Amino acid sequence: MFTVMAMPNNFQHVTVIEGQPCLFISQGNIMSADTKIAELLTELHQLIKQTQEERSRSEHNLLNIQKTHERMQTENKTSPYYRTKLRGLYTTAKADAEAECSILRHALDKIAEIKSLLEERRIAARMAGTYSDNDPPRKTMRRGVLMTLLQQSAMTLPLWIGKPGDSPPPLCGAMPASSDYVAKQGDKVAARVKAVDGDEQWILAEVVSYSHSTNKYEVDDIDEEGKERHTLSRRRIIPLPQWKANPETDPEALFSKDQLVLALYPQTTCFYRALIHTPPHRVRYGKADLATDIDVWLRVIFSLSSVVAR
């Protein structure tokens, strides 16, 4: 989480958060998606059990390492016997850790697949309920409910966990999307649109489609539940982050102090100029405590330089 200083009309302190590729299903496949999700949840449960079993199995070896070090301290010497023994114990511990890491990564893949299917199901359900122009207007989501959903989306943004030596990918934290990146249906993006008064503003929107022939997006204003649709060129769309960046392992993927950004202002779906006040120093999995600043999640923040470049 970042603390930023918002600058709509005057300076105020606020704080801001960070986005999973989707496959897509048709309206008639919602039931099959539910079945697949149930299967994946069963597989995830098995992987969690395997993780605990692997951890329990390796505890004996870790205890042996601890006891060996205690004996060495008691005898105040490091004999060839202890060196050989520790080498073997550490080799086993490393293999155990790699096995546990492999299971955990597999579990993370399952979680990502489940989230993707849930998003597909949401899109399919929404498309199945599409109204024609002759139908009565659909109910709009209450603002409080919308704000809660946006906050939950930000809080559950997956943490990027790369292998040793891996660099953070595009759309991880402050890392921009690649120049040829095309946002997928259902992705949340920042969209530059004309307001009722004619002024342009950046809003939070959801991708409906992208035309490779015209290089234009169709997006829905997230605040209007699909009522207001915009057709915009790529330069008016900025994809939002798909992963949180870990401050401890990937600090280069974080926005820096005093960096100018556009951030989603609290209780709105519009982006305003802001100044990073306090970058995060550790990973936060829940909602942070409010101090003298207003908290805003990194899911809805992007660099002002990416706007200037367009």
Image (cartoon, rainbow, N blue to C red):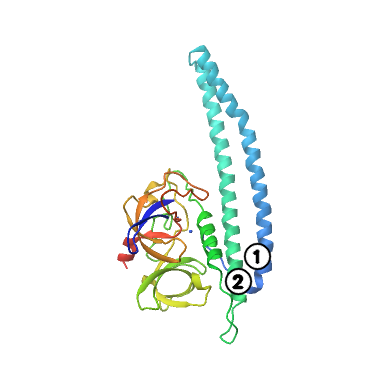
Numbered tag placed on residue 33 in the rendering: 1
Of 11 and 38, nearer the camera is 11
What residue sits right under mark 2 in the picture? Answer: 124
Percent coordinates x, y for residue 183 in the rendering = 46, 67
Of 111 and 126, nearer the camera is 126
Residue flagged by tag 2: what amino acid is it? Answer: Ala
Q: Is residue 140 visible?
A: yes
Give the CA distance from mark 1 to mark 2.
Answer: 10 Å
Q: Is residue 215 visible?
A: no
As helix, strand or loop, the secondary structure at mark 1 comes to helix
Is 275 on the left or on the right of 164, as rendered?
Answer: left
The 10 Å Cα crowd at callout 2, few under 14, some 14 to 19, many 20 or more, is some
Percent coordinates x, y for residue 83 in the rendering = 50, 21
**Which quarter shows the C terminus?**
bottom left
Disc on the earlier residue, 1 or 2 = 1
**What residue lies at 30% left-to-right and 65% top-to-bottom?**
308
